[in-house]
Amino acid sequence: MREIFRSNDIEIRFQLKKQIIIRGPGTSEFNNHLNKYLDLLPPTENLRIINDQNRFLAKLSFDQWNLIANEDIETKKFLKLIDNLNSNSFTLATDYSDAQVFFRIMGSNRFKMLNKLTHFDFREKSFKALTAAQTLLARIDCAIFNFDDYLYISCNRSFSEYLEDRLIDAVNF
């Protein structure tokens, strides 16, 4: 984790995380299969997050869940998990770790700062804790994961430097 910025009650950190995109039908058989290997029952409602101390699982569309590790996982164990998830015909798990980067944003002004980069509604009634969103931030397609005291923003690795610069600009204006 690399600290990018700390000022004006905002702290921004850059992180690389292990991430698996899981596709499937969302049936009870699918949910039980995921729970068997993850010890997390996948959220059934779109844009919801289920988490424990080591990872979180977000449902980003009717057939897609993103599993993101909060801690570093040994590569061998990580690949074994993907193999286990792919052990049936109705689940497709793909390592997406090298394609995405994450920005952890903390501080009481985080929503005020992000409002400068998007038209997304960050009010509590629209964007509750333990929910996710997919939106454009500074014209970059991003996923935003809302936790109680911080946000994770993920974007394609190729846009990470540009987004990092826009986040810093938004804090300074």
Image (tube, rainbow, N blue to C red):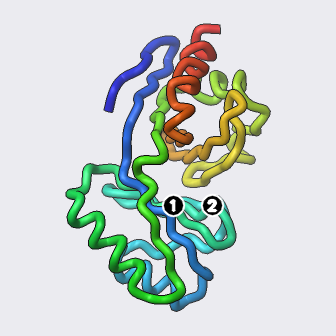
Q: Position of residue 48 (x, y in %)?
A: 60, 61
Residue 24 located left or right of residue 55? right
Relative depth, front residue between 151 and 29: 29
Looking at the rendered structure, the kind of residue marked 1 is Asn
Q: Position of residue 104 (x, y in %)?
A: 45, 35
Q: Residue furthest right?
A: 119
Which secondary structure, mark 1?
A: strand
- Binning the other alpha carbons within 10 Å of mark 2 as few (below 14), some (14 to 19) or many (20 upward) gives many
Looking at the rendered structure, the kind of residue marked 2 is Leu
Q: Label 2, on which residue?
A: 60
Relative height, residue 115 to residue 87 (above, below): above
Please identify the quadrant where the C terminus is shown.
Answer: top right
Q: CA distance from mark 2 to mark 1?
A: 7 Å
Query: Going from the N terminus, do you reach mark 2 or mark 1 first?
Result: 2
Relative depth, front residue between 149 and 42: 42
Residue 67 located left or right of residue 63? left
Please identify the quadrant where the N terminus is shown.
Answer: top left
Q: Position of residue 69 (x, y in %)?
A: 36, 55
Who's the residue at 61% across and 52% down the image?
132
Relative height, residue 3 to residue 71 (above, below): above
Q: Label 1, on which residue?
A: 66
Tell me whether circle 2 and circle 1 mark residues in contact (CB < 8 Å): yes
Relative height, residue 123 to residue 169 (above, below): below
Q: Position of residue 111 (x, y in %)?
A: 63, 29
